[in-house]
Amino acid sequence: MAKVRNPTTFSRHFKVEPSRLADLGVTDITLAVDTRLFLDPLLIDNCSNQDFAQKAAAQYRKYFENAIKVLAASTAVGDVAWRAARRMFEFHEIRGTCLGYGAGSIDGSAWGPELVDKVVNTAKAIVDLGVRDPDIFPLLGLLEEGVGPDRISDMTTNVVLDSIVAFNVQVIDVLKLAVEEFTFRGSTVRLVRNPFHPKRTPVLLTPRDVLRPLPTASDWDGVAAAAAHNDLLRKRVNSLVAHLWADHASRDKKELRKEALASGNAFQVLLDAVKATKKEPYNLSIDPAGLLRWAPDGERFAQQFPLRIAPPSTLDLQGVHQVVRAIVDQFRQLVEANGLSKSLWVGRRPLPEKYAQRLFFTVAYCYCKQINLDISPEVDSGNGQVDFKFSSGFHQRVLVEVKLSRNSKLVDGFTKQLDAYKAAEETMRAVYLVVDVGSMGKKDERLVKLRNECATKGQPISDLEFVNGHIRASGSKR
């Protein structure tokens, strides 16, 4: 599981109603960990915030029109024009948007020299085909290894940073939030500071309707579907780059790049197919992938149903274990009786295991704050991954792993935890928490049998806990 150390959202920390942010078209981010959403440049024109849409689109177009002119002027790698183009793709790390693949932080990463060279060479090849459309650059995610949605998002953020800053100034003015001065590209602006980052970092909020989990220009499925549903495009694809769509899941980007760059017509077909995709941002109101709502859902239930537990007189190993057992029991109550199970599903489909883990973390985090008990994700060196560590000092550790019943390695995971438990002797306790969302089969029986065998042999035993994660009918319908 990604190392989420703090589930606090922007709305929670700054005491702004989430509905107020939604009305302003603002994404309610978690402040200490990245959310896997990305700024898609192809959505900028359709942003509901017209001021942002106009300014950002103009910035984006001007920047890449200039890049195309410089690339067209280059006649050899390393000449003056080529070096100028290269400088335009040296995108720097921008902290603060809280978007991307960061596991336990909001830190981005700059484009390294090798990646910059690769991208400039490909862009030059495209321009030499006679293509002059600024929207060629998001397509680099389709053609180059190492250029995923996070890189395209970072590139776009760098290019339209002034518009993002202006959007934040606008939002801050409406919400009347406390600000500090930050310097961007030689200009001083007043922005909200992120309280959870070790370095002095601003919060850079983004519009809700320019984000996708995966930009279409990085997703072959979306592009191929667009071509398949457009008669004219399908004919052009079939006549020029049919192999581009064939079995694309098993083909590497190097081969696809070769085919797309075979001619100006071939690349134009690809570009037209990308532009034909639906311009739909991620639906934050429904949040079908559970990318954001684990934090507010967990927090809301923890507050609505507080844990009535008196802190142990001593937070020794037994005391910490007692608290963790109480939290696990409360989580079961929230899921099975208080309606938290609904958060585990989208329609009839359970959300991924990571969502259940983060949901449990948020609930536990809220309860742990009551008694000053530390909770943090941990990777157990040598014995595999552990989801959470509850601790009061090194020798008072209780480890908790949260798994879904659908996990094909559910039984193996319990065995690994038992092995870790044995090695630790008396320095830890462990809980294996299984959330039943279907596809259990006989895995529960095998888990119970394993635990009983350990008990019979007098070996250390992990707590084995089951939670029914199915959505239950209301009392009147049972």
Image (spheres, rainbow, N blue to C red):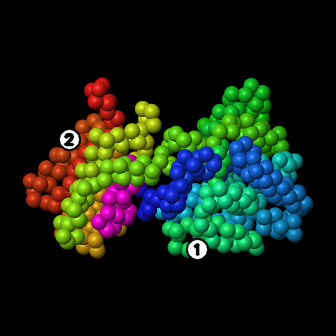
Q: Quadrant of residue 163?
A: bottom right
Q: Label 2, on which residue?
A: 445
Report the side of 301 relative to 424 (left or right): right
Q: Is residue 253 visible?
A: no
Q: Main secondary structure of the magenta part?
A: helix
Q: Label 1, on which residue?
A: 200
Q: Look at the image and say whether residue 169 sits in the magenta stretch.
A: no
| Kind of element beneath mark 2 | helix
Q: Quadrant of residue 203?
A: bottom right
Q: CA distance from mark 1 to mark 2?
A: 52 Å
Residue drawn where x is 73% and y is 66% of the image: 90
In this rendering, which labeled residue sits more in front, label 1 or label 2?
A: 1
* First reached walking from the N terminus: tag 1 or tag 2: 1
Q: Which residues are magenta?
A: 356-380
Residue drawn where x is 82% and y is 43% of the image: 263
Q: Nearer the viewer, residue 106 or 464?
A: 106
Q: Look at the image and say whether residue 373 sits in the magenta stretch.
A: yes
Vertical placement of residue 263 versus 10, above or below: above
Residue drawn where x is 60% and y is 63% of the image: 177
Q: Quadrant of residue 85?
A: bottom right
User: Which amino acid lies under the numbered mark 1 shown in the image of this protein?
Assistant: Arg
List x then y, in percent, for residue 405: 32, 42
Q: Nearer the viewer, residue 109 or 206?
A: 206
User: Which amino acid lies under the numbered mark 2 shown in the image of this protein?
Assistant: Glu
Q: Which quadrant of the rendered structure holds the C terminus? A: top left
Which label belongs to residue 276? none
Residue drawn where x is 69% and y is 61% of the image: 169
List x then y, in percent, for residue 275: 74, 39
